[in-house]
Amino acid sequence: MIARALKLPRRGVSAILGVTIVGLLVLAAVFGPSIAPYDPLKLDFMARLKGPGTPGHLLGTDEFGRDILSRLTYGARTSAWIAFATVTFAIILGMIVGILAGFYRGWVDRLLMMINDALLAFPGLLLALGIMAVTGASRDAIVVALGLAYAPAVVRVVRASVMSIRQREYIEASFVMGNTELVTMMRHVLPNCVAPVTVLATTMFGWVILSESALSFLGLGVPPPAPSWGNMLASARPFITQAPYLIVLPGLFIAFTLLGINMLGDAVRDWLDPKMQA
Amino acid sequence: MMRFVLDRIVSAIPTLLIASIAVFAMIRLIPGDPASIMLGDLATPDQVAAIRKEMGLDGSIATQYLLWLTNILSGDFGQSIGSGDPVLPLILERFTVSATIVVAAVFLAALIAVPAGMFAAWRQHSLGDVGVVAISTLLLSIPSFWLGLMILLLFGLWLKWFPIIGYVSFNEDFWTALSYIFMPVLTLVLVELGAIVRMARAATIEVARLEYITHARAKGLSENAVIWRHAFKNAFAPTWTLIGLILGGLLGGIAVTETVFTIPGLGRLLVDAIYARDYPVVQGCILFISVIYVMVNLLVDLLYPIFDPRVAE
């Protein structure tokens, strides 16, 4: 029901837009160093707070004279890297737990699901804040914190598909052939979880980028001076009257990226999971 | 009905237990002596010895947990390292600020979004429907902190309609309080509008296809009577659950909005305590927000049968 509620009309157009926006993000992330006109950390006190359109600085400079376009490009790199690492971490963890719970059932399942549902029952950002309080702010800490916060959703999806796969004849056949449980799980159960997990992973990409920028905005994410869209917004806040573009630009980048990922997510779901189509 | 209520209450217990264990374990996971962590850098050896005894650090981890839980349940959340004040009153004071904003925002968002979603569903594929869906999709992609900053820029700095920093309690002066609360509430309303509209729309489309709606129309009822007397209750039930989740989720993420508008709420208290390594306050905030979150969802579940009595049978 929720999945259906989040559907968009006119999927063809939105799929193309989604692929384009996400493609641009990936390009910026991969080729950032060659696209960016300046070093994102290079200070230039002669060129502080220059507005967009200044010769030499297409999108202007910040309070330390750093080039905004370069920082936004590197910010894409930061966000994409953290999102990729976090989603990978959440999926590996979620798949292991989900397969164990769905395959063995019984008390293993009950114990794992009790912990999982408790984790799932909390707002992701609160869980991440709690973990960041223990570890301190760093890139690795964000990956672990957000990964743990989002893994329970993966566990739910994987467990559900494992439970239905487990009833199929070919799993029984695999045992009859003398395969061990480990081989059966890796060769026959795992590949069947790929479609639902891919659908979830695309959506999760957007959640992670949003949460990462929120954490960075709070000063508990990517530590400065490294640029991330969230910490650019946070450091621009005192200059909101003098240089509103410092706030408008990173936010536009985040919003566009999320819009692209949401559209791509809907397209991926339709492609891999035709049953969900209304 | 009684069974349904009991079931729901019992099912909240494991979640609360695991949350309490996680919050308890937090201090033990930080490298260093838990007693020194709870007291901060400026503690004297005597103080450390005293709190070691208070926390039962010489006993087993299980006895330490039980001791801690007993204190929490009796309302003793410890003292703030920074100010030395007891933590619970501090949390309750900040909570009233956050709760005012969150409850007002969710109430207004639901008041706008539910009719908008139902309207869109009733005229599915019309221009109005496409517009409502497009706006809600756009709103879903805008990060709350950025939207907040944009609202601050527009209404606070350019138009100068509202004060940009701080909070005034409604007990002091109603209109002043309203002027301070306007921008944060507007931000949260816009942020949550998208999800509620889409949910209400989808649920209504689902209900509108059912036979009893066709039957109600065949009876000759007016379209308004069909919507409000027959479709509304069923269409609202799933949206009601979403509203509960949003209400709790906002409390978890309120720190961001409070940072934008410099509001002394619970989220800001938590983030500041994390900066300052004021662990008793960090623990207290996380535990308190978790409990509120579970309670809100429990309450939403318990009230669900009002809209859909079938679940209680």
Image (cartoon, coloured by chain):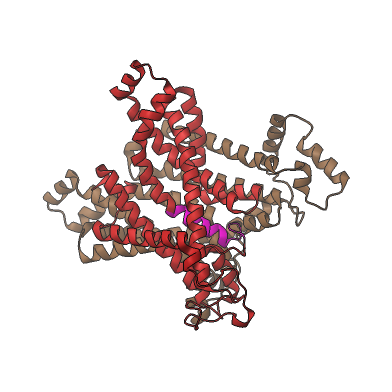
Relative side of B171 to B29, left or right: left
Left or right relative to B187: residue A240: right
Query: Residue A215 lies in what quarter of the image?
Result: bottom right
Residue B143, compared with residue A125, is above or below; it is below
In the rendered structure, does residue A220 fall within the stretch colored magenta?
yes
Where does residue B117 sit, x and y in percent of width and height?
30, 58
Q: Is residue B283 above or below residue A49?
A: above
Q: Percent from the top left, x then y, of residue A59?
A: 48, 76
Whether residue B91 is visible here, answered yes or no, is yes
Where residue A15 sits, quadrant-wise, is bottom left
Residue span colored magenta: A206-223
Q: Is residue B102 visible?
A: no
Q: Main secondary structure of the magenta part?
A: helix
Q: Residue furthest front?
A: A34
Q: Nearer the viewer, residue A170 or A150?
A: A170
B44 w.r.t. A54: above or below? above
Q: How many marks?
A: 0
Q: Position of residue A194 (x, y in %)?
A: 36, 39
At 74% from the left edge and 49% from the top edge, which residue is drawn? B79
Provide residue B178's location: percent of width, then percent of height: 52, 70
Chain shown in red = A
Tell me what hue chain B is rendered in.
brown
Q: Residue at x 35, y 28 (%)?
A: A188
The answer to if A207 sits in the magenta stretch is yes
